[in-house]
Image: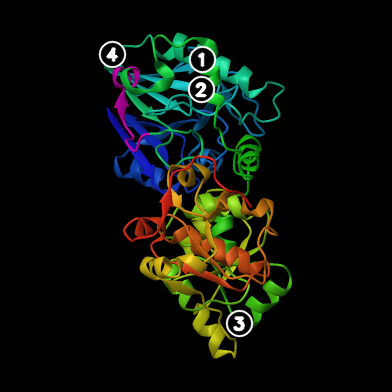
Amino acid sequence: MIVEQLYTKCLAEAAYYIESKGEVAIIDPLRETEPYITMAENNGATIKYIFETHFHADFVSGHVDLANKTGAAIIYGPTAKTGYDAIIATDNQEFKVGDVTIRVIHTPGHTQESSTFLLIDENGKETALFTGDTLFLGDVGRPDLAIKSDLTREDLAGMLFDSLRNRIMPFADDIIIYPGHGAGSSCGKNMSSETVGTLGEQKQTNYALRADMTREEFIKEVTEGILPPPQYFPKNAVMNKMGYTSFDEVISTGNKALSMDEFNAEVKNGALILDVRTQADFIKGFIPNSLFIGLNGTFAMWVGALIEDINQKIVLIAPEGKEEEAVTRLSRVGYDNTVGFLKEGVQAYTANGGSLNTITSISAQEMADAYSDAKIIDVRKPGEYASEHVENATTYPLDFMNDDLTKLDKNETYHIHCAGGYRSVIAISLLMQNGYKNLIDVAGGFGALKNVEIPKTNYVCPSTL
């Protein structure tokens, strides 16, 4: 038996490859199917089943394409309704993969169709639980992402309490927990950076599995402090439920070099210029009206949070050789309408007479020196700001910046920082798209500011715009 976790840090997402006697099951695959097909072919094995723990909201699964390419059956737990052929399993239904068995355990709460998959090995031992977004390491799934549900998040949280207590916690402490996500995902609040653990460890350390916790306490703790989900979540969930354009077609359309004339024509027709280079390269010079979201960070999550129209046409400015990666990572969160990339990027733009914009960036020490007269904007998450921030800094979280882009005075100069320098450049590019001009980046963000003499506070009632 082979069990392999395929973890994608950019999405904090875990897919799984299970093989026995030449047969393979894939759990929660990413959009691009080639890695799974190649693994199976290299092992002389055949993909038999594709198990989906639920209708994912934070990424588009590769289940439909993988089924079309391999003939494997897609399997969901009870209550799921799909726009394509799938097996809707009954609770406790078992599926053979070579000499091992996978049992479907209905664990509603994160969503109504959410299911956990129990792996039983060749000797009949209950070996592992693939818990999807029902149980994470250190946390449980948020109960507010169900599609078109009449249930409240409190209703779903109650269902989740029952699922955890009645369906998961009775298993032996040594059973392995393989979750659907790790730290950084928006599907929970307190996820561990670890991606594999045991149920016994979770009973000891996971706040949601406390033995003395009442149902009411669980509902309160799980629903308290949940930030609104990113706007793309329900759109991805619908794509996973109903189907989507094939990944191969998305790549064929998007990974295409555009001449300067073609690039200009696409922009004139409404395409968004998305610059995916590093923040250091972007600061030095970028095409006016570009949105920066670098491939070197949590790219897909910020694309989904900030580009509100999932059908938005996109033209890329990308490092040479990274164009297909950019199109792939866009497609993972459902942005399938990339129409190409500018051949030779900003060099082509300037060679054709275009003038680049730049961003002024200062060091943390320069920020400290200018502190008394500076208007400082902190674009980190509310929790980060509340934990510690520069005194008199104003919180303007990047996550919610699109909700009101008129909060600042366009005639003022602002010093903008995040935690490390990635989000602040995204924020500046977004604000510049909307008419702001006097914006200064603080290099290294709060991580650098912590090491200089500048007033700081951890006051938990931050000023707001």
Could you say which disc has been placed on residue 125 in the image? 4
- Above-or-below relation of 7 to 432: above
The tag earlier along the polypeptide, 2 or 4, is 4
Report the disc number at residue 316. Answer: none
Q: Which residue is mark 3?
A: 260
3 or 4: mark nearer the eye: 3
Q: Which mark is residue 221?
A: 2
Which residue does the image show at 51% across and 63% down from the upper left?
416
Q: Residue at x 59, y 70 (%)?
A: 290
Secondary element under disc 1, as helix, strand or loop, is helix
Few, some or many C-alpha atoms within 10 Å of disc 4 (few <14, some 14-19, many ≥20)?
few
Q: Within 10 Å of the Cα at label 2, are there few (<14), some (14-19), or many (20+) other Cα atoms?
A: few
Residue 46 in the image: state x and y as whole percent: 39, 35
Q: Are marks 3 and 2 in contact (CB under 8 Å)?
A: no
**Which residue range is magenta in the image?**
192-203
Which numbered disc, 1 or 3, marks the residue closer to the eye?
1
Residue 153: percent from the left, percent from the top? 62, 24
In percent of width and height, residue 415 lies at 51, 66
Q: Position of residue 309 (x, y in %)?
A: 68, 53
Residue type at numbered disc 3: Met
Specify few, some or many for label 1: CA neighbours under 10 Å numbering under 14, 14-19, or 20 or more: few
Q: Which residue is mark 1?
A: 217
Marks 2/4: CA–CA distance: 34 Å
Label 2–label 4 contact, CB within 8 A: no
Q: Are marks 4 and 1 in contact (CB under 8 Å)?
A: no
Mark 1 and mark 3: span between their CA atoms?
Answer: 60 Å
